[in-house]
Image (spheres, grey):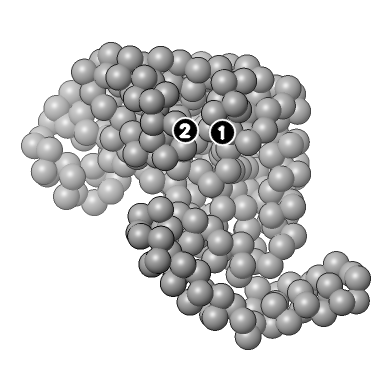
Amino acid sequence: MSEIDQSSPPGVSTEREGPILVVRIDREKVANALDPDSMVLLRHALEEFRDDSSLAVAIVTGAGQRAFCAGSDLGRTPPAGRPFAAALLAPWEEGVGDGGYVRAITLSEVAAGKPLIAAVNGHAAGGGLEIALDCDLRIASTTATFSLPEARWASIPAVGGLSHLLRAIPPAVAMKMLLTGHRIDAHEALRLGLVSDLYEPDELLDAALELARRIAANGPLSIRAITQLARRSYEVPLSQAIAMEQAMWGLLRDTSDRAEGRRAFSERRDPSYGGE
């Protein structure tokens, strides 16, 4: 790892390796649970990733090996201070945690088409699992666990957790997790397809970086196109999703990168892409 960003305040830290940004939830003493301040920092880190054209892939993980993220830090969530509507309609940073209402951090929306990898290095509970579900790829350590326990505390997973989980694994299993707070381990998550690969805890970040490098080596426009299409396709009928694919293919057809990819294939060499 190189180019460590020493200026990142406690709560969220970032490290950069070439076109890859590692975003680390850094509150290890509280199982990387997010308080309002760290939620703002997490969003800012993804905004910087979105706006930096030299960054292609982001990895989201947690500090240490105990937890990826335990969700919201309930001990630092303030009591109700103003009506729900006021918090909902306020500027994003003002609404975080206001009146007991935590504004949604939809990482995929902030990243705007750039792929996100969740490297789940321990417990992913509540909002932590919601963050992982919002990423495009998920890998995990063999010690990882996954749960959405909100119903036990008279709430619901409302930052996409319910909807994403029902799409990610068999609905019957998802409903068991949602209604009971049932926790599954890493091997069950792999069997269900919630994650694609498992690694030993000390190998997880290296594996995530290698996966990110493989993605970043491909055509940057095609990677963003695939990511955007994948996020949108399950929201529309199949015929519309296919029409979206055809339109995106047409946009990419005459790009310099696509021509370079075809030349590199015929010349049996690695392509050199410029994002054009």
Give the left or right position of residue 217, taking residue 46 as reference: right
Quadrant of image for the C terminus: bottom right
Q: Position of residue 14 (x, y in %)?
A: 59, 42
Q: Which residue is mark 1?
A: 193
Q: Residue furthest right?
A: 268
Q: Residue furthest left?
A: 83
Q: Position of residue 34 (x, y in %)?
A: 41, 28
At 26% from the left and 27% from the top, the residue drawn is 156
Which residue type carries mark 1? Gly
Neighbour class for label 1 at 10 Å: few (<14), some, many (≥20)? some
| Sooner in the amino-acid sequence: mark 2 or mark 1 | 2
Which residue type carries mark 2? Ile
Label annotation for residue 169: 2
In the displayed structure, would residue 93 be above or below residue 229? above
Q: Position of residue 194 (x, y in %)?
A: 53, 32
Q: Nearer the viewer, residue 9 or 112?
A: 112
In the displayed structure, would residue 89 be above or below residue 263? above
Find numbered disc 2 in the image and state the secondary structure of the residue it sits on. Answer: loop
Find numbered disc 1 in the image and state the secondary structure of the residue it sits on. Answer: loop
Q: Which picture quadrant has residue 164? A: top left
In the displayed structure, would residue 96 be above or below residue 91? above
In this view of the protein, can residue 101 be seen by the observer?
A: yes
Q: Position of residue 46 (x, y in %)?
A: 49, 50
Q: Nearer the viewer, residue 195 or 116?
A: 195
- Quick check: marks 2 and 1 in contact, CB under 8 Å? yes
Q: How much space separates mark 2 and mark 1, taking CA atoms? A: 6 Å
Q: Nearer the viewer, residue 174 or 143?
A: 174
At 40% from the left and 15% from the top, the residue drawn is 182
In this view of the protein, can residue 38 be seen by the observer?
A: no
At 70% from the left and 22% from the top, the residue drawn is 201
Give the left or right position of residue 255, taking residue 26 as reference: right
